[in-house]
Image (tube, rainbow, N blue to C red):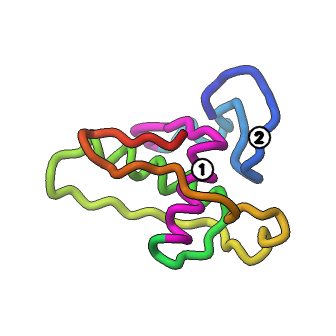
């Protein structure tokens, strides 16, 4: 939903470059653009470190939640919905390789 030119996405189901009309009456405070690399890195990170078998759009949701945590006041709560499970993606090898997430310090992370 970044408003940029249309292009392909590896993360299924969340790659749109426009803001849908039904959002007009909703109160949206922030939209984060999460790269495919970030989404897949968080997917692997959560699987390896927390045993969560989630799909890549859930990894992208976590990346956005982490970004939001850096701008919220200390002690704030964030609720993140993981919209998909990883069982249907096992054949795509989305958990293969190392997670490239570095520790969440200094108000940022490195997912590349």
Q: Total label count?
A: 2
Residue at 62% over, 70% down: 54
Q: Please determine whether, in this image, residue 71 is positioned above or below residue 86.
A: above
Other residues around mark 1 within 10 Å, as few (<14) / some (14–19) / many (≥20): many
Q: Residue at x 61, y 75 (%)?
A: 53
Query: Foreground: 80 or 35?
Result: 35
Q: Residue at x 69, y 31 (%)?
A: 18
Q: Nearer the viewer, residue 26 or 84?
A: 84
Q: Which residue is mark 2?
A: 9
Left or right: where 69 falls relative to 28: left
**Residue 47 highlighted magenta (yes or no):** yes
Element class at badge 2: loop
Which label is found at residue 39? 1
Q: Is residue 12 left or right of residue 42?
A: right
Residue 48 is situated, as x and y percent measured from the top left of the image, at 53, 71
Quarter residue 7 falls in: top right
Residue in front for this viewpoint, 105 or 68:
105
**35 shown above or below 89:** above
Secondary structure of the residue carrying tag 1 is helix
Residue 58 image point, x, y percent: 59, 61
Q: Answer yes or no: do the residues labelled 2 and 1 have beta carbons within 8 Å?
A: no
Q: What residue is shown at x 78% (from left), y 72% (from top)?
A: 90
How much space separates mark 2 and mark 1, taking CA atoms? Answer: 11 Å
**In the foreground, 33 or 25:** 33
Region in magenta: 27-48
């Amino acid at each position: 939903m970044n408003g940029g030119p249309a292009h392909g996405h590896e993360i299924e189901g969340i790659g749109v470059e426009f803001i849908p009309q039904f959002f007009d009456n909703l109160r949206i405070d922030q939209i984060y653009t999460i790269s495919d690399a970030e989404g897949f890195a968080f997917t692997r990170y959560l699987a390896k470190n927390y045993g969560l078998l989630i799909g890549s759009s859930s990894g992208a949701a976590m990346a956005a939640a982490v970004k939001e945590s850096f701008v919220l006041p200390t002690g704030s709560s964030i609720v993140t919905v993981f919209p998909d499970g990883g069982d249907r993606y096992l054949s795509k090898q989305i958990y293969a390789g190392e997670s490239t997430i570095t520790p969440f310090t200094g108000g940022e992370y490195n997912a590349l």
